[in-house]
Amino acid sequence: MKIHPLLSLALAAALGLAGTGAAAAQGNGVLVRNDGIYLRCDQCGTVQRVEQNITQGGGHGTAGAIIGAIAGGVLGNQVGKGNGRKLATVGGAVGGGFAGHAIGNNTGSNTSWLVRIKMGNGSYQNIQVKDASGIRQGDMVQVDANGNIARIQ
């Protein structure tokens, strides 16, 4: 009769130690997948957040204005005769300059993604990638030495 209480006490102690061992191992680069499988990977982590970043163009408006003015002046010079041709040349240069400036300021805008990852060792990494279409919050990922992210199945 005294065997049952001893057995239950030993089982409770074993379960308690197993729980503390798993928590300590998770801080040492071990991750737990959704299906309960443990992964040991120092370069792996769980995606905490995925944010879209849009950076505006590089501000090449001056070069765009010059190129636009030249192109507009050349095209304007093809229209009309006499004073009309001069007016068309000036108008084309001015219009081309404004258009080229606006186009030059808007070119070069980039969309990138910032992925915040909680690594298996408890640290955080922020990785900027060009395409994060296959990565969602909660996914387990591996980060290589070049900063590329691969989803773990």
Image (cartoon, grey):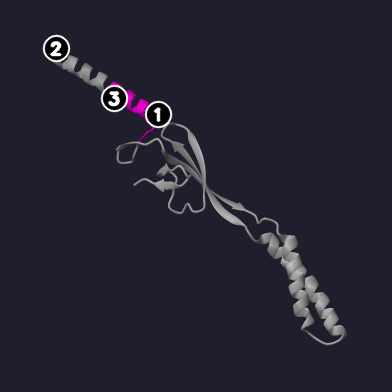
Task: Locate residue 19: give its quadrant.
Answer: top left
The residue at the point 39 percent across, 47 percent down is 151
Give the farthest residue toward the bottom: 81
Task: Locate residue 120: give its quadrant.
Answer: top left
Determine whether label 2 and label 1 are within 8 Å by CB: no
9 versus 125 height, above or below: above
The residue at the point 45 percent across, 31 percent down is 122
For marks 2 and 1 on the same chain, the one whose residue lies earlier in the sequence: 2
Residues in magenta, as a range: 16-31
Q: Which residue is mark 3?
A: 18
Give the farthest residue toward the left: 1
Q: Which residue is mark 1?
A: 27
Q: Is residue 141 left or right of residue 67?
A: left
Q: Residues within 10 Å of mark 2 (few under 14, many from 20)?
A: few
Position of residue 132 measured from the top left corner of the image (x, y, whole percent): 47, 51
For marks 3 and 2 on the same chain, the one whose residue lies earlier in the sequence: 2
How far apart marks 3 and 2 lie (CA) works out to: 25 Å
Is most of the magenta stretch helix, strand or loop? helix
Going by the numbered disc 2, the residue's amino acid type is: Lys
Q: Residues within 10 Å of mark 1 (few under 14, many from 20)?
A: some
Q: Which residue is mark 2?
A: 2
Judging depth in this view, the residue of 12 and 85 nearest the camera is 85
Element assignment for label 2: loop
Give the farthest residue toward the front: 145
Going by the numbered disc 3, the residue's amino acid type is: Ala
Q: Is residue 132 left or right of residue 94?
A: left
Q: Is residue 11 left or right of residue 64?
A: left
Element assignment for label 3: helix
Give the farthest residue toward the right: 83
